Image (cartoon, rainbow, N blue to C red):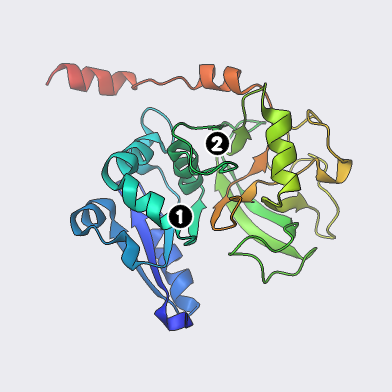
Amino acid sequence: MNVDDIKVCVLRVGGTNCDAETQRAFQELGVQAETVHVNELIKRRNLLDYSVLVFPGGFSFGDYVRAGVIFARHLSAKLGKEIDAFVDEGRPILGICNGFQILVENGLLPGISGVSAYPEATLTTNEPQGFKCQWVYLKQENRGKCAFTNRIPAGKVIRLPIAHGEGRLLFPKEKEQAVLKKLVDEDMLVFRYCTKEGKAADSKYPPTPTAAFRHRWHLQPRRQHLRLDATSREGNVLVATTRLDTADADAAVRRRKTHIPKHHRQTNQTR
């Protein structure tokens, strides 16, 4: 496929931001890119007209309930078959920030055994807590599987901006060792935080923006400080978020249990 034949769909809803910048970034590469509201995509039923699907950042649907979950459920109900077909054909999907949360809630990631019917992970608040807006250094760790990064030389250090408040990925405690080992063994991790010189950040803040990781999984030390810019098993689904952590996911879910904010409950009760 020629570059100018590639069509990119940047999908948005209320609360999405950075969609214009994302569209422009793709256009700068010489491909066709447009921002499409999800309602329009549902109406046209033409997702498979696109070569690449992108979920940009922001606060989709105001992040009510929890980040990304409403958009994810909406996709499952309205475009589930089309999304499955898109993935099955190996077409690239990119999730950025809130887009990562959407893909996790949708069951598309971590994607170790394909698309899951229920979320197999969760994202929770950074440690130390707070919104992190800064520049970071990342080292290319992937061995070439990821469709979005396979032209970045192995070991290359790049500098990127980040902006997030809930970027700590958690797996169920009883599964975390097996899942993390598989992510590494099957080349599903892409970048890791590092210093300007390319040395592992070793969980130090600010090189690692959420510096709470405390050696809780048993892999080689050089693998212990990984930013989860992760790709699916097939290499066609990529997400960009903060970093990998393996604290007790059950506790995180309890802290972030499904809820409706108080002011929203009162509004609903008056209707």
* Residue situated in front as seen by the camera: 140 or 182: 182
The secondary structure type at the circle numbered 1 is helix
Q: Quadrant of residue 50?
A: bottom left
Q: Residue furthest left?
A: 271
Q: Which mark is residue 166?
A: 2
Residue at (88% x, 41% y) in the render: 221
Q: Residues within 10 Å of mark 2 (few under 14, many from 20)?
A: many
Could you give the CA–CA distance between mark 2 and mark 1, rounded to whole angstroms? 29 Å
Labels 2, 1: front one: 1
Q: Position of residue 132 (x, y in %)?
A: 60, 43
Residue 99, percent across and down? 46, 48
Left or right relative to 170: residue 17:
left
The reply to whether callout 2 and callout 1 are in contact (CB within 8 Å) is no
Q: Which mark is residue 108?
A: none
Q: Residue at x 73, y 56 (%)?
A: 137
Residue 197 in the image: state x and y as whole percent.
85, 60
Pointer 1: residues within 10 angstroms few (<14), some, or many (20+)? few
Dot 2: element:
loop
Task: Choose between 15 and 130: the one closer to the eye.
Answer: 15
Specify whether residue 18 is in view: no
Residue 121 seen in this snapshot: yes
In-front residue for pair 237/262: 237
Q: Amino acid at mark 1?
A: Asp
Q: Position of residue 228 (x, y in %)?
A: 65, 46
Residue at image location 59% in from the left, 51% down from the top: 162
Is 232 placed left or right of 154 in the picture?
left
* Rendered residue at 45%/36% (across/down): 105
> Relative to the observer, which residue lies in front, 75 or 48?
48
Quadrant of the image containing the C terminus: top left
Q: Where is mark 1, residue-wise? A: 88
Label tally: 2
